[in-house]
Amino acid sequence: MKIFKTLLILLTSVVFANAQQKNELALIPQPSSIKLGNSFFKFNKQTSLLLPKGNEHTELIKSFSAQLSAILQQDLKPNRKTTGKNFIQFSLSKDLGEEAYQLKVTKQKIEISAAKPAGWFYGWQTLIQMTRLNLQNGKALQIPEVSITDEPKFAWRGLMIDVSRHFFEKEVLKRYIDQMAKYKFNVLHLHLTDNQGWRVEIKQLPKLTSIGAWRVPRTGYWSGMSAPEPEEKATYGGYYSQEDIKDLVNYAKKRFVDVVPEVDLPGHSLALVASYPEISCTKTPQQVLAGDPWNAKRTNVVCVGNDSTYTKIEQIINELAQIFPSKYIHIGGDEVTRNYWSNCKVCQQRIQDEGLKNVDELQSYFINRVARIVKSKGKTPIGWYETLEKGLDTGIVQMSWKDEKGAVKSSNQGQKVILTPAFLTYLDFYQGDPYLENAPFTVNRLSNSYKFNPLPEGINVKNVLGGQGSLWTEQVPNERKLQFMTWPRGFILAENLWSTATKTSWPNFLKKIETHLPLLTLDSTNYSNYFYDPIVSARKDDSGDAVLIIDTEVPDLTVYYSFDDTDPDQFYPKYKGQAIAIPKGAKNIRMVSYRGNTLKSRIVKLPIAELKKRAKL
Ligand code: ACM
Ligand code: ZN
């Protein structure tokens, strides 16, 4: 009997351990609470989807049905049956928050409860994710019994795309939105204007798109792009017509994504100035650029003294307010070269007339005035956080980008804030060694981006709307690269911005990330696997010689290396954790990582001279 009891305990603990393993479910973002049962809901040909009462939500449920039908490879027709089993049901639960949901999977049925359609949508995303994570040989057979309660931590869970430096067609953005929605992002911030292109039709100012949307084609390193040749045609570019925007916004709305437009003013405005040179202080003709204007001394700032500048801005904002239903309009405000204003009579006159001290205060004046225009259209202005002496209207949402300090300061001054600290959330920063990339930008490796905390010390929590990842596209010329820069860092952003669950450790989250990569592949979405790269640095050893240290972001990898300019594999010397001496005459180190016998990284080749230079040796 005793033996039987012991066996029973052993057996139960094995079953329990299995359930525990499954308990992680690998969902991204991690729901607030998960209670796993022991049985399963099995999908079969009879599985059905129940429409909720009334017709209001039929379209939404039909879109769910189409999505699941594709995964199950069967035609799942919504119906109104209310009894029996083997169905998916949507119910109302009035006490839940706007985006909250409960998902209950039992042997008999699946039930998603929410107060609002947004909650159903997010419950549905969780269900779909569970289903896709449980595919067996590509087939959805069953999902585990579970009870999930979930709601987001922040209202603003965003990704930004700069569509100015490179233009991305509407269909690219739709595919991007599809992926966003799967991970419960709800804001797509479009950086629509910059020095390199104006991307939205403004009917009252047609030159913005006939001239401002086009530049000469250039390929290669952003920092060294050559100026347009005389008579060279501006053939690279594009823009969204107002019909495109309406279509895009409608598409996004069905996926509970708000599209927030940005026009970046008064700096970053070369495309605007090239279209209407009279808007600048110098009024000199300009061309939209490929590459950076700072090298080419272009006037990329508008004249803020001239009233006619505000007339044009009002025309722009008026049309944006009509085509973007979002509550927000972003007015930029970052990185302004103020010396044009110092040399402009009209700007100087404005300083006098308004009793301002200097051009810094003139910038505050401009931003506050444009913000008032935005508010007059019933919208809330957002601006990139800049330290401005005279300060800004408290009604302007501050998007804190250089670091978190702007958010901490503004939130305590009563302003709403959105966090996108560059060194943790910028998606244009490299995921691997910068030496292997094509511009002198900096690095934001996957494990580094995991450190993002949208509620840094000292912040006034009640003023935090949320945060976002921001993808500047100087070095992002196509859709595959757009995806590559977003994923898998997007998983981390989704986790940080949605999940109220206690953050687990980096190695644990990494396991989840690896579980999700095949889902990106299933969706033909590109991602970076540079997080498998060996990371090498030089230092001096005790005798003063330069030695190399190798590290990895992923704990369970083995690194193999060579100094003889041949490509290493798992039969090459293994890095054993100690500093390695550099053989005489070695020009490069080449490294590769493996997990067991499985190749995980690309071959990372770095010059010894570069490593010594970095270490100042
Ligand atoms: C920015 O990165 N200039 C907002
Ligand atoms: Zn001026």
Image (tube, helix red, strand yellow):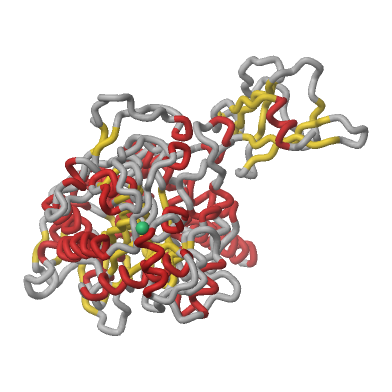
Residue at point 23%, 30% (across, down): 235
Residue at point 55%, 65% (across, down): 404
Q: Quadrant of the C terminus?
A: top right
Up-down relation of residue 16 to residue 170 (above or below)? below
Can residue 564 be seen from the camera position used here?
A: yes
Can residue 126 be seen from the camera position used here?
A: no
Q: Quadrant of the N terminus?
A: bottom right
Which residue appears farthest toward the right when viewing the image?
543
Up-down relation of residue 574 to residue 108 (above or below)? above
Up-down relation of residue 372 to residue 290 (above or below)? below
Q: Nearer the viewer, residue 89 or 273?
A: 273
Ligand 2 rendered quadrant = bottom left
Residue at point 47%, 74% (across, down): 391
**Image quadrant assignment for residue 324:** bottom left
Residue at point 59%, 52% (across, down): 507
Q: Nearer the viewer, residue 344 or 161?
A: 344
Give the percent coordinates (x, y) of residue 516.
Answer: 42, 47
Give the percent coordinates (x, y) of residue 10.
Answer: 59, 60
Q: Is residue 193 left or right of residue 203?
A: right
Give the percent coordinates (x, y) of residue 350.
Answer: 37, 68
Q: Is residue 141 left or right of residue 435?
A: left
Up-down relation of residue 255 to residue 382 (above or below)? above
